[in-house]
Structure formats: structure tokens, C-alpha cells
Image (cartoon, rainbow, N blue to C red):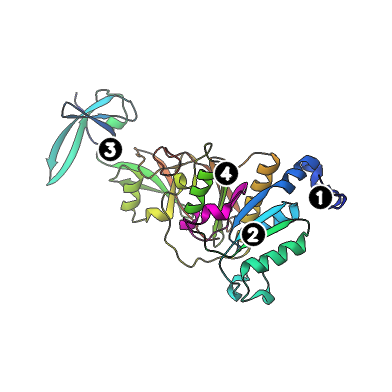
Amino acid sequence: MLTDSEIKRYARQTMIFGEEGQEKLKNSKVFIAGAGGLGSPISIYLAVAGVGNITMVDHDIVELSNLNRQILHGDTDINRKKTESAEETLTNLNSDINVNIITETITDENVLDLVGDSDLIIDAMDNFDTRHTLNKAAFELNIPYFHGAVSGFDGQATTIIPGKTACLNCIFPQSPPKSVFPIIGLTPGLIGVIQATEVVKYITGEGKLLENEILLWDGLKSEVEKVKTNKRPDCEVCGH
Amino acid sequence: MKTWIRVLKLDHLQLNNLKILRCLKCVNEIAILEKVRKGIKKNLIKSRKNSCKSARLGLVVKMKINIKGQETKDLKINSSSVKEVLHELEINSTEVVVKKDGIIIHEDQLLTNEDEITVIKVVFGG
């Protein structure tokens, strides 16, 4: 049930999906892996949209070099834990929601405990090894996994529904080598907002998801391309 | 008339010690013979169906390759699978995905004459 304050706060978006949709957002539990470049726009837009329960995991502290893109954090947050800075920012934006922070590194061993009873997993990581860990967890828990990744002016996003779509391992069976990647904040801004849009659509049941297709963004040409993806029959994660 | 072509790593099965391939284009079974030429062992096959385009490929595969962000090039590739094409182009397969006909294709997928593929760099940051 929405409060009077919530009805007023979300009046412009309940015009889209009604109070029923807003209640679905309020009752949802989302797990955001990472409080950095992608995690910032994802969490900010889900918080202001009224997603009721946001769990955010990150093990890092805020550094000066993060501030060109990680808009959850500011100058005064340098050397603070990203999760603590994120919690403060999100609750300042919307005090009606619950923000649960976990300062941990996501591993194969702890991922299921960290995700807990979340309804879905949002990928805001900066490496594919952890993404594969999250993809396996999503498959095991039978919950959706919203993938996004960025570098420079380029980005990609797709929505993975266990049993229905190709999983991350079907599309990217190998992890690209880790390295320091170039980035300008507007790229994770754009891709993160696409991921957040997918999450809101999934929860409210509005629109068509990026299922079995990956969206590729070329910022230098301002071009968007959607490429179809297929399940891999021999996929180690979902192919059995 | 016999048509001899290079084997394109077709889906194969073993039958009475005779290696049989199934042509992906015409879906007919194709018997295999082997021939050694210039010291290199090459698999040769005989198509049972003359209309099969795969069976008339010749010794190299010609395909259009577009490395995203660059101009499309026509290249003659001595390879048959995505993995081998990337290897021949000296592209690290962990850093890219390959698109054909609007679909991301897997590394072990076979490519044939006149295929057009696009190599797309995977981004991994967050």
C-alpha cells in the first residue's frame, strides 16, 4: 500500500504503470553488484523510482580518479567506503526506501549468501570473472541478471532470464583480460540507465526486455545496434 | 564427375571405420578421403550432391570481415571456424564476439564461402 507521500512523489510515473506498478517497485528487492561507474546511475535511478529494497555490494574506497564517473560519490567522500557513501547519497535522494550495504568482495563462495532473497541481480562490475560468478548465481537462484559493461565511449547491455534466454556464459564464454580501461562518465551513465530501465520494466511488467539480444552502444558515432544472442547447447552454466 | 574440396570441419560421425561427414549446407553425408600434398595432410571430401555449394568451395574461404569501427574487408581465409579465423587474424578470441546475419555466433561455428562477419570488441569495465 502506498502512503500519501509516495502517491504524491511518484504521481508522474504512476501515470505510466499505475499505483499497482508502483507497489511492485516498492516491494521489490534488487541486488546491485558494484557501487562504481555503472552502480551509480543504476542505484540513483532505481532509488528515485521507488524500488523499495536496494542491496549494494562493493569492497572499494572512493578515490579521486573515480569522480569523473562515479556520481554516487563526491569530493568529501574520498577515502570513505563506497558503500557508505552510496547509502548516504541514496537515502538523501529517497528516504522512503531501504538501502542495505555490504562491504565485501563477491566470490564464488559468498555470492549466494550476499544475494540472499533478492528478486534480481544487476551487474555493475568492472571484470568478467565476477560477472561469471553472478551469472551462475542468477541461474542457480532462477532470478534475472541484468548485464552491462563499458569502456571509453562504448557500452553493452543485455537482460538474462534463466531458462528463457542465453546466459552470460553463452554470449561471453571467456573472460577478457583484466586491465585499466579508459572511461568517460557519460558512457556508464547511459548504459547504467539502460540497465535500470530494464529492471523497472521487468518489475512492473511494462514493455519488451532486451532478451536474447545485446544492445551495443557506440558513443563516438551515437549509434545503437541490437544483436541477437543464442543459447549455447554446451554452455557450462545453462546448457544442461 | 568427382568434386574434391577441402573439409570444412563438418559435423562428423564414425561409421564402420569410415569417416563420414554431414555437409551443413546440403545435409547429405559426405565420404572422406585423405591426401598428402606438399607435406601437409589435407582432408578431402566428395560431395554426393553436385548442387551443394559447400562442395564447390575450393581450397580457401572468401568472406567479408568487418572489424567494428574499421572498413569492411574481403579476405581470403584458410580457415573454417570462427576460432580459426580469429587466430588467423591474430585477434584474441577472449576480447571479441563475432556477429553473422545479426546474430552473435559461437567460436566453434563453421563459416562458409561469401559469409560476412563482424568482429566486435567486448567491453568489460563498469
Res. A168 visible in picture: yes
Residue type pointed to by label 2: Gly
The span shown in magenta is A107-131
Instruction: Report whether mark 3 lies on the same chain as mark 4.
Output: no
Residue type pointed to by label 4: Ile
SS of the residue under disc 2: helix
Instruction: Report whether mark 1 lies on the same chain as mark 4.
Output: yes
Depth check: give the residue in front, B103 or A202.
A202
Residue A138 horizontal/vertical position (percent)? 53, 47
- Residue to which mark 4 is pinned: A143
Depth check, mark 4 against mark 2: the one in front is 4
Whether residue A130 is in magenta: the answer is yes
SS of the residue under disc 1: loop
Residue A98 occupies quadrant: bottom right
Q: Which badge, 4 or 2, is on the more N-terminal residue? A: 4
Q: Which residue is drawn at 74% across and 48% down?
A: A26
Depth check, mark 1 against mark 2: the one in front is 1
- Numbered disc 2: what chain? A
Residue type pointed to by label 1: Tyr
Residue B27 shows which numbered tag? Answer: none
Whole-number angstrom distance, CA of label 4 to CA of label 2: 25 Å
- Residue to which mark 3 is pinned: B9
Residue A189 shows which numbered tag? Answer: 2
- Numbered disc 3: what chain? B
- Numbered disc 4: what chain? A
SS of the residue under disc 4: loop
Left or right, B66 with reference to A86:
left
**Circle 3 Cα neighbour tier, 10 Å, few/some/many (<14 / 14–19 / ≥20):** some
